[in-house]
């Protein structure tokens, strides 16, 4: 495997030029066609004076032109900076100014003075394909980026709500694809990717598919499930990468339709947050012959661990063993390594040679999480008796009541197994004696009345006393953030 994704793309352009590389919105491009487009767009950028390390800010899109730009910038030695597809001109301009000297902005046609003033070259996204065609020189020779060169900056808000630019080298995407042989990627992989194209889940998995010579099927969200199934059927999709919220949405509305296609699917990856044990069991029932994986990762570290629950069993907290090349340790608030257990979890700290360089122009935030070749996550965890890495929840979400640490997702998952809850949130309410009192907010099944006594009895039979909610209340819906995760800051007191 080459030292960059665009370098590997060139290999497949020679060995399988006619094979579909990307399918998006009725458009399709082969490996040979994609690499020609990348070379053409690279030539356009070089013609306009791009230099190694220059920034190109781009509005993300589930489209072929987007990946032409992505790899064209890399081949030109630039740094690709994707933003949300619906971001405003003000956000684009502010991001460009925060980066400093931005070479180009790729976005919808704009006459916004702030955007035009923030870059040397403005490229309408509708012009990318035409510019690539017009500047393609079949005889031109380009140097591929090295694995240690900066390739992209991905902006993430994490748990703080403040956007931070995560600086990533090319090896960030290459090394996991080289090392993790547990996931069954290959040239036959046809993977559907419905997550936003500026998020790690889609960027990482699209590049992984292309590194293995497969086909990436880009979907513009899941608002239209009819269009989703049409794309899946037309492209011959046999694998997915989905966040739990997207998976829940598909199963809740069209579980039987999804299950009817099970014999076509090879594997499904679930990433972004924990998947409750009850949902794991339901998935194995719906898709008995499909390999089902939980992948634990973060933008700062890349892939950390992988767990095939369809083979090793549904569990509440397991997220697998660390992928090759990654060492997981446990540390306290000061970064000192400690022993961790289910009753006393500690911060998950990841040691690897593919971590982020840091947060762009934010040494203070970088120093809080990165020490040398280690990054400390905001998750608590431990290793169980069988050697599996287990997650005990976000450090800021853990409820401390009477000196005990309670993982809210453990309580939520068991509540969901009761059959009494459609959704729920476990949070802590302030108490002078205990610090926090465990509280469960429940959306009843089918929107009916909530049997609080039945729910409390069910939980008390399955949870230790200090974990059992002292307060149970009915709510109409669970508030979630833009990524579909529970908005725990909203519920925190």
Image (cartoon, helix red, strand yellow):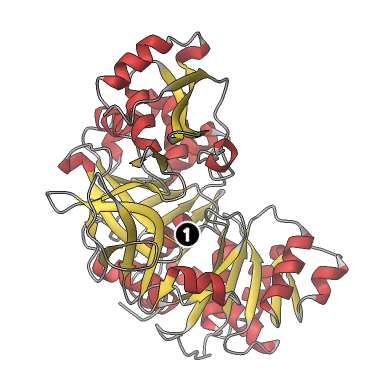
Residue 209 at least partly seen: yes
Q: Where is residue 301 in the image (x, y as percent from the top left)?
A: 39, 66
Q: In which quarter of the image is residue 325?
A: bottom left
Which residue shows up at 39% across the image and 69% down it?
Answer: 375
Question: Up-down: is 344 above or below 367?
Answer: above
Which residue shows up at 50% across the image and 41% down it?
Answer: 485
Q: Nearer the viewer, residue 111 or 10?
A: 111
In the orientation shown, which residue stands out farthest toward the left? 386
Q: Where is residue 54 in the image (x, y as percent from the top left)?
A: 62, 84
Q: Which of 439 and 435 is in front in this view?
A: 435
Which residue shows up at 48% across the image and 42% down it?
Answer: 231
Count of number-bearing discs: 1
Q: Is residue 404 toward the left or the right of residue 308 in the image?
A: right
Q: Is mark 1 on a helix, strand or loop?
A: helix
Question: Up-down: is 104 above or below 199?
Answer: below
Q: Where is residue 306 in the image (x, y as percent from the top left)?
A: 27, 54
Q: Is residue 306 toward the left or the right of residue 107 in the image?
A: left
Residue 167 at least partly seen: no
Question: Up-down: is 51 above or below 121?
Answer: below
Q: Which of 419 and 220 is in front in this view?
A: 419
- How packed mark 1 is, by other alpha carbons closer than 10 Å (few <14, some 14-19, many 20 or more), is many
- Image quadrant for the C terminus? top right
Q: Is residue 370 toward the left or the right of residue 73 in the image?
A: left
Label 1: which residue?
200
Which residue shows up at 50% across the image and 72% down it?
Answer: 366
In the orientation shown, which residue stands out farthest toward the front? 433
Q: Is residue 351 toward the left or the right of residue 98 in the image?
A: left
């Amino acid at each position: 495997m080459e030292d960059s994704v665009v370098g590997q793309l060139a290999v497949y352009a020679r060995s399988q030029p006619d094979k579909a590389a990307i399918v998006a919105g009725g458009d399709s491009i082969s490996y040979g066609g994609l690499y020609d487009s990348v070379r053409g767009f690279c030539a356009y950028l070089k013609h306009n004076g791009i230099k190694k390390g220059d920034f190109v800010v781009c509005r993300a899109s589930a489209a072929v032109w987007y990946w032409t730009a992505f790899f064209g910038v890399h081949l030109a030695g630039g740094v690709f900076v994707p933003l949300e597809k619906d971001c405003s001109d003000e956000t684009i301009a502010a991001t460009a100014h925060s980066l400093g000297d931005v070479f180009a902005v790729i976005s919808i046609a704009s006459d916004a003075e702030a955007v035009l003033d923030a870059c040397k070259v403005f490229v309408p996204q509708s012009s990318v394909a035409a510019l690539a065609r017009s500047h393609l020189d079949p005889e031109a020779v380009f140097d591929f980026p090295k694995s240690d060169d900066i390739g992209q900056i991905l902006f993430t808000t994490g748990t703080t709500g403040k956007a931070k630019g995560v600086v990533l080298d090319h090896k960030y995407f290459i090394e996991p694809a080289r090392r993790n042989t547990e996931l069954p990627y290959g040239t036959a992989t046809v993977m559907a990717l419905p997550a936003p194209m500026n998020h790690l889940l889609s960027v990482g998995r699209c590049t992984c598919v292309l590194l293995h010579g497969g086909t990436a099927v880009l979907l513009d969200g899941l608002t239209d499930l009819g269009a989703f199934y049409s794309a899946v059927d037309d492209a011959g999709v046999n694998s997915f990468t989905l966040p739990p919220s997207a998976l829940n949405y598909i199963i809740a509305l069209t579980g039987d339709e999804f299950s009817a296609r099970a014999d076509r699917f090879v594997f499904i990856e679930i990433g972004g947050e924990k998947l409750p044990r009850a949902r794991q069991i339901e998935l194995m029932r719906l898709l008995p012959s499909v390999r089902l994986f939980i992948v634990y990762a973060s933008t700062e570290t890349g892939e950390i661990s992988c767990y095939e629950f369809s083979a090793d069993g549904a569990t509440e907290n397991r997220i697998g063993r660390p992928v090759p090349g990654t060492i997981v340790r446990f540390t306290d608030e000061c970064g000192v390594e400690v022993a961790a257990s289910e009753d006393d979890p500690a911060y998950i700290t990841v040691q690897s040679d593919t971590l982020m360089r840091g947060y762009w122009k934010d040494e203070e935030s970088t120093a809080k999480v990165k020490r040398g070749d280690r990054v400390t996550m905001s998750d608590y965890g431990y290793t169980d008796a069988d050697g599996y890495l287990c997650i005990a929840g976000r450090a800021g979400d853990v409820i401390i009541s009477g000196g005990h640490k309670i993982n809210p997702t453990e309580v939520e998952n068991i509540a969901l197994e009761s059959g009494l809850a459609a959704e729920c949130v476990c949070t802590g309410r302030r108490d002078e004696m205990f610090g926090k009192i465990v509280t469960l907010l429940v959306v009843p099944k089918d929107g009916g009345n909530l049997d609080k006594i039945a729910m409390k009895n069910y939980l008390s039979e399955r949870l230790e006393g200090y974990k059992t909610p002292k307060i149970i209340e009915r709510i109409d819906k669970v508030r979630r953030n833009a990524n579909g995760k529970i908005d725990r800051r909203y519920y925190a007191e």
